[in-house]
Amino acid sequence: MGLLLDGLYLTAGLALAPRVLYRVAFQGRYRGGLRQRLGLIEPPGHTGTCIWLHAVSLGEVNASRTIVEALKYACPACRIVISSTTDTGYMRARALFAKEHHVTYMPLDISFCIRQAFDRIRPSLCLLMELEVWPHMAAEAYKRSIPIVVINGRISDRSYRRYLAARPFLRGTFSRLTLALVQTDQYAQRFISLGCSPEKVAVTGLLKFDTAQLDQQVEGARELACQLGLDGARVWVAGGTGDGEEAQVLEAYRYLKEDTRLAGLRLVIVPRKPERFDAVADLISAKGLPLARYSLIKQGKTCPAPGAVILGDTIGDLRRFYSLAAVIFVGRSLVPMGGSDMIEAAAFGRPTIFGPHIENFRQPAQLLLAADGAIQVKDARGLADAVARCLLDEHLAKSIGQRARQTIRDQQGATNRTIAHIIPLLTRKGH
């Protein structure tokens, strides 16, 4: 089965090679960590208990913060290795964890790459954020009697349909999981249907409620406001936007600019993917709007024109932009892309708006909407109307924000529930 799977990976790799090479050449992706992706990971220091935590991308890395802190507190002598697949995830992991822990790119799920990685990392426990259940990794951990645990587990509607189609091939992989600690009852049933034993599945809640930073003071926010000339301005931030969505945001902005009561409104757009920064800049200019690219302002190469639409074309600054907002739109939700994390935005106590496509964040969206702690819209005109209501009704905006923050507080505790399941696994292994 291992050789067959490697053959399938090779076939898929050849088919995807033109796309990958294009991204390497023109988008700057996948250029880093080649040796690590092949499993040639530098051994992470001293021998002893080692926990390998894998978080595929930026969102999963951010969600792992409280888990890493809790593991370090519960097992001070443990080494922790954090791996990520994407460049943005790796860079964020470096920023968060590299001072204390070993950060690496995730090796490809090819048999010899995975064996090399296990030989070098020598983990005592593997933790997989959300749904990073790879066949060779699960098989290698199982062969070495290393517990492998999914934490903050979820399976989106789209992923579930794909996994069901491949269930005959994946049942063995899911059956090798030691535990699946998942966000909701629905996700629990999905893991069970894919091969997990019911006694190995537990609902522990959503880690992102724990990682939400309810302190509204953000380092560097004042400096950012001064750089962009936003002191005292009413600011609308559209964060984590996706392809086809910025045009709708700009359409909504045009509606709002026609309202004399909203004179001086400033718009900040922060696309989700760095490779789209130039395309979004071109779109803003094509709409006849003055443009200010934050990357150039940050380098001191230009100053923002009065009233310019600000493009947040840097990595790691979204939270600082959110802190300046009077109202926030959370992207990848007006287009069918599954949504973006609305918890981080709602934690600021600002009115938070998102579209109909929130499949990847259904639970937090439903909780916020049920508490009247967020607003859901269908299209650009609905978005404009919601932004206007929040900007023109100070009491409404404040009450939405307060209810959102209270909802987040009420849902916290997933970290402690998760750690309570993990620590006994280390104890049983004699660590």
Image (cartoon, rainbow, N blue to C red):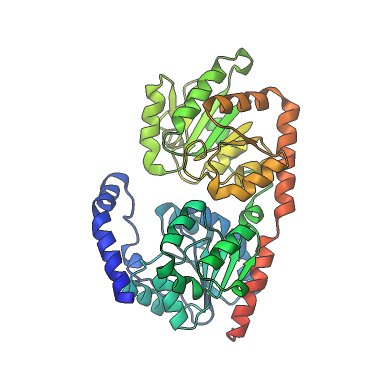
In this rendered view, identify the residue nearer to me: 158 or 325: 158
User: Where residue 361 sits: x, y (%)?
Assistant: 57, 48
Q: Residue at x 57, y 28 (%)?
A: 383
Quadrant in which the C terminus appears: bottom right
* Image point (55%, 58%), residue name: 154
Question: Is residue 368 shown above or below 35?
Answer: above
Residue 211, quarter of the rendered image: bottom right
Residue 266 location in percent, x, y? Answer: 55, 25
Which residue is more in the foreground, 225 or 163?
163
Q: How many marks?
A: 0
Question: Quarter of the image containing the N terminus?
Answer: bottom left
In the picture, measured across the screen, residue 302 lies left or right of residue 333, that is left
Q: Is the residue 378 above or below the residue 5 in the image?
A: above
Could you tell me which residue is drawn at 66 percent across and 35 percent down? 351
Towards the viewer: 89 or 111: 111
Q: Position of residue 277 (x, y in %)?
A: 39, 37
Q: Is residue 34 visible?
A: yes
Of 180 and 120, nearer the camera is: 180
At 46% from the left and 76% from the top, the residue drawn is 45
Q: Is residue 204 left or right of residue 48?
A: right
Say whether residue 233 is visible. Answer: no
Residue 178 drawn at (x, y percent): 55, 76
